Amino acid sequence: MPRDKIRVMIVDDSAVVRQTLKDVLESDPDIVVGSVAPDPLFALKKLETERPDVIVSDVEMPRMDGITFLKNIMSGANPIPVVICSSKTEDGSDNAIKALEYGAIDIIQKPKLGTKQFLEESRLRICDVVKAARLARLKKVAPSAAPREVSPKLTADVMLAKPPEIAHIIETTEKIVVVGASTGGTEALREYLESLPLDAPGMVIVQHMPEHFTAAFAKRLDGLCRVNVKEAADNDTVVRGRVLIAPGNRHTLLKRAGARYYVEVKDGPLVCRHRPSVDVLFRSAARYAAKNAIGVIMTGMGDDGSRGMKEMHDAGSYTIAQDEASCVVFGMPNEAIKAGGVDAVLPLASIAGEVLKRAR
């Protein structure tokens, strides 16, 4: 097996899912599926003689559930990055969110047979998550084994056209905070939000996560934090003490009507290979909040958010990037820094304090 490819083990009790995932992953020349297992006990036996770079595991399986399997993997001397592959049922959502607490790198939704667009979008998401998981462990990207065609990566232009100049917006005392995160972001956001007081400034967050999982994620955070956290719905008002999480598979934009800030939740194509996209949220904040906005970009692979943060910075927003030492993957913050759109680079533990200071 080529050593420069990302070696994946798939653990799922469905033979159809195992084969579908194998086909999807191996459509990327950087990935090879080295082994498959119908349940965690078979997988643990295989792990005695082989070590994959990434494990893709279901949650609900016979003989041993995926949470217990994850605990076994993460408690070992040499833990392996695990990506949870779950269905979109409510029970599956709760279990998948719980898996993130035990060290799972990310969540992907089980691929389904359907339209060509759905399958292509699933392929991009699944392969990108596996690559990010590999990066999270070794802090480097496996080299490409062969040249490949890259799917067009759309920008925020497809959702909100960039005007020649950002309209002048009068600065007010009320600040709005927009946050973007991806790989490693679920736990980073928990730590960040738990540090906020009850009257923290109104906030909108894009965390790359599949459809139906963001509601469970918001519910979990709402039970842990002093601020109110909910999955964003179209026309929700952004107010103090409330955090809105962009729903999976829907773009979320900040809008303004008079003194009222609210969100628009809408369909649209993938932007920077994501829906929701951080770039879409950040561009809307640059346009409708400008100096009244604070932007934060956290851990994640890729460059989603880098262009939008530069636009926010140029419009007068104060912008913060999480530092490399506290990131699971220093991709998105690094791209934003390189684009020249970041005012401050801070460790995760310091971001909440800086946001509150700037919002006062």
Image (cartoon, grey):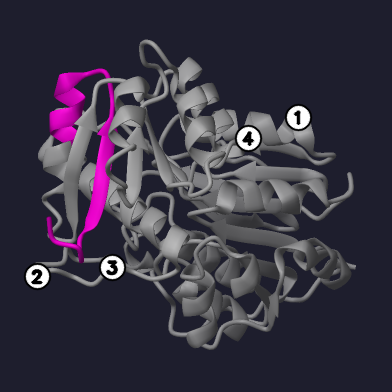
Say whether disc 3 or disc 4 marks the residue closer to the N-terminus: 3
Say which element carries label 4. Answer: helix
From which residue to which does the magenta span run?
1-21
Image coordinates of residue 346 in percent, x first then y, are 71, 74
What's the CA distance linking mark 3 and mark 4? 33 Å
Task: Work out whether 177 lies above or below 204.
Answer: below
Say whether disc 1 or disc 4 marks the residue closer to the N-terminus: 4
Can residue 238 be seen here? no
Residue at which label 3 appears: 142
Residue at which label 1 appears: 223
Disc 2 marks a residue whose amino acid type is: Ala
What is the quadrant of the N terminus in the image? bottom left
Disc 3 marks a residue whose amino acid type is: Ala
Picture mark count: 4
The residue closer to the viewer here, 109 or 14, is: 14
Nearer to us of marks 1 and 3 is: 3
Nearer to us of marks 3 and 4 is: 3
Residue at which label 2 appears: 146
Residue 348, image quadrant: bottom right
Image coordinates of residue 217 in percent, x first then y, are 59, 34
What's the CA distance linking mark 1 and mark 3? 38 Å
What's the CA distance linking mark 3 and mark 2? 12 Å
Image coordinates of residue 251 in percent, x first then y, are 44, 49
What's the CA distance linking mark 2 and mark 1? 47 Å
Dot 3: few (<14), some (14–19), or many (≥20) neighbours within 10 Å?
Answer: some
